[in-house]
Image: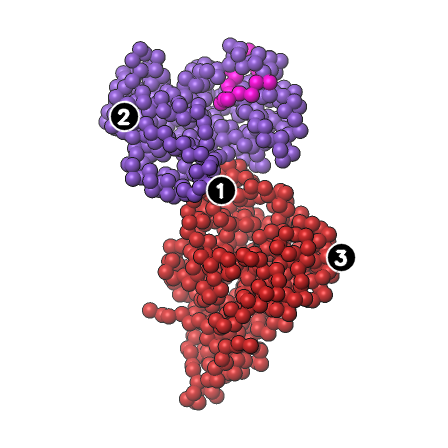
Chain colours: A purple, B red
Amino acid sequence: METFAHRHLLDIEGLTRSEVERILDTAKAFFEVSRRPVRKVPTLRGKTVINLFYESSTRTRTSFELAGKRLSADVINMNISASSVSKGETLQDTCRTLAAMHPDVVVIRHWAAGAPNYVASRIDCSVINAGDGMHAHPTQALLDAFTIRRHRGTLENLVVTICGDVAHSRVARSNANLLKLFGCEVRVVGPRTLLPAAVDSLGVRVYDRLDEALEGADVVMVLRIQSERLEGALLPSLREYARTFGIGAKAMALAKPDAIVMHPGPMNRGVEIESEVADSDRSVVLSQVESGVAVRMALLYLLAGEATESPAIGEVG
Amino acid sequence: MLTQPTPSIPLILRGGRVLDPSSGLDETADVVIEAGRIRAVGRDAGAAFSSNENVRVVDVQGSWVCPGFVDLHVHLREPGEEYKEDIASGLSAAAAGGFVAVCPMPNTHPINDNRAITEMIVTRAQELGGTRLLPFGAVTKGQKGAELTEMADLREAGAIGVSDDGLCVMNAAVMRHAMEYARTFDLLVSQHCEDHHLTKGAQMHEGARSTRLGLRGWPRAAEDIIVARDLILAELTGARYHVAHISSLGAVRLIREAKSRGLRVSAEVTPHHLLFTDEALLNYDTYCKVNPPLREAEDREALLEALADGTIDCIATDHAPHSDLEKDCEFETAAVGINGLETAIASLLQLVRDEVIKPLRFVEALSAAPGRLIPDFEGGSLREGRRADVTVIDPDLRWILTEEALRSKSHNTPLLGRELTGRPSMTVVGGAVAYELERS
Ligand SMILES: [Zn+2]
């Protein structure tokens, strides 16, 4: 089998369409493994994966942990709280410490954009970005793509509307980058205070009105609104946000009849999404979680697995 | 008072290309220096002196002989952050960079907002000799933006201007009164133009690249708003107002308009804003993290044009040394600033070779132009009788910038490891050689 051309996954930028397809196809095989009675494969036996989390995210960390364990890797979690950073261990020192452990993969979640690039340049191993500041969240974009493909049958030429706090969202950036590779029309909608300065440079269509943005959408991606946005004069109230940009059944009626709703979680019900939508059969939120493990297994396999070894499952060609 | 000994032996710089913007001179000539003054300039002017055995003759054929360079904006970190730089290392770096005088900003620890600190740093520099130190005092006590400093005291102690650099004087009433008060004592008021409300958490220029990198942006508007406001206040008060490290095309436009109406305003630009754009940040290069930030190609073009036509008066390095630890970290944690004293000339000569800026204007922007902004400045010219502040540049010398090549205590420059062409080869301050390049 052809080796994967990248050592790290730091960003969606830099991946080609066929590389994304390869990751998704590999994930499909692992997805099926996850539904078998014995869900563990020996692919990464003897390999060490370190989850280095500078932001608490039980959801993402657990997903990576499960992915590593199902591949039989040794998985170590390092949760570095903000307080221990202020006590003074620099990222430089942490990299030295980690390098001494000879990991095969470091999965990093960090509050600072670019921190995964820094780690990748200082530790001789594969690095997977599990979300860095407002920059990128490539594994989320890949699992979203996997979920879309699973529920819509294709990724090609879809209309995808991303709603809400695009300015502070690494998820929105990575998704926009990925979906453009497949010819999707990516729309963003939200109050202008929550759109990035050069939103046009993302290659998306910008809408001020939710109804227009949702018209004919195949996929509605709802972003989380953080209450911090009330500070700094970005939003007057969560109430007004919910009323103008929150996704309820009425809003969803404007999208295609078979449109799906996604949310990277955790959801603020009643703010960016109403329960009537979150719990409806259009919601694929739980499917996103399940896809997450498979996509992360695929990435660990492609980045750290032996090129010559098949993933011990027949489906991968 | 301590002054460096003036050498009695005449110094003859023979056969160089003499570039003196104060007289428009650009020709091959000798420069004769005696008793701390320019004694003669002209073809074979040295011949009359060379017969005397007791002279030093330096062959500078192929080199440029210029009025000594002046840097209106440096950070020497003493007192308080001597691990980054101190007055001795900073002045040594300045001399090696071709500067006969540098103007340190007051954001030290403690802040230079009073006579005692100004006297301390001026005295320290005089003890060291070589490149002169002409400090800025703070505009407001503790750079807090509220109460004015004792500017008469600062001026008497040796301050040449006031600035709260690193911070902007945000309150318009305070700025107005600072301008009025500074005018009384003929102090230049230099402003770090940044509306801090618009730059909370900012890491780089706001635009497509900050969006792509997910870093908080510093919009041009934050600079332009302050420049516009201050120009209105400068007109109201008649103060000598100076825009530090101008970086945006809007600010250039505002300065051009103000000058066309005869306001006594001026501006400086840094080498990094003339040479780089925010494209340099695409790999999160902390060595290019600087404040104000590197902007876009259209800003850089506007800065180059404005420097060439004199809208921007001078080049200042904003030399901002930081330790390796402060740069070898997450981008958002990294300190802002670029180490500039020893790379400015070498890196900017590229603009002269590319004919973006003419040699005489280049020299003027580094010597006579900043000199004019300093009260009672005696250098800045090679005319006979002027104080012998001279910078000699070898414009063709190729060298590689290594950490070892730097006299600064810090090495935070994106040019590290690059080959540069051109380098100051001699710096003469008041007739005394403060620096001479050792040739291998
Ligand atoms: Zn400044």
In the rendering, at what x and y percent does residue A11 appear? Answer: 43, 33
Instruction: Give the tally of numbered discs.
Output: 3
Please, which residue is most extreme toward the right here? B236
Quick one: quadrant of the C terminus of chain A? top left
Read off the chain for label 1.
Answer: B
In the rendering, at what x and y percent does residue B241 appear? Answer: 67, 59
Element class at badge 1 = loop
Q: Spatial distance from mark 2 to mark 1, Cα to Cα?
A: 35 Å
- Between residue B33 and residue B298, name the one nearer to us: B33
Give, as a single range, the part of the protein colored magenta: A252-270
Question: Which amino acid, mark 3?
Answer: Leu
Whether residue B173 sits left or right of residue B274 in the image: it is: right
Read off the chain for label 3.
Answer: B
Residues marked 1 and 3, same chain: yes
Q: Residue under label 2, please give it.
A: A44
Q: Residue under label 3, please give it.
A: B236
Q: Residue under label 1, please give it.
A: B332
In the rendering, at what x and y percent does residue B405 appear? Answer: 38, 62
Q: Main secondary structure of the magenta part?
A: loop
Question: Please, is residue A85 above or below residue B273 in the view?
Answer: above
- Asked whether A255 falls inside the magenta stretch, the response is yes
Q: Residues within 10 Å of mark 1 (few under 14, many from 20)?
A: many
- Asked whether B104 falls inside the magenta stretch, the response is no
Q: Spatial distance from mark 3 to mark 2, Cα to Cα?
A: 73 Å
Residue for point 72% across, 61% down: B181
- Between residue A60 and residue A254, name the one nearer to us: A60
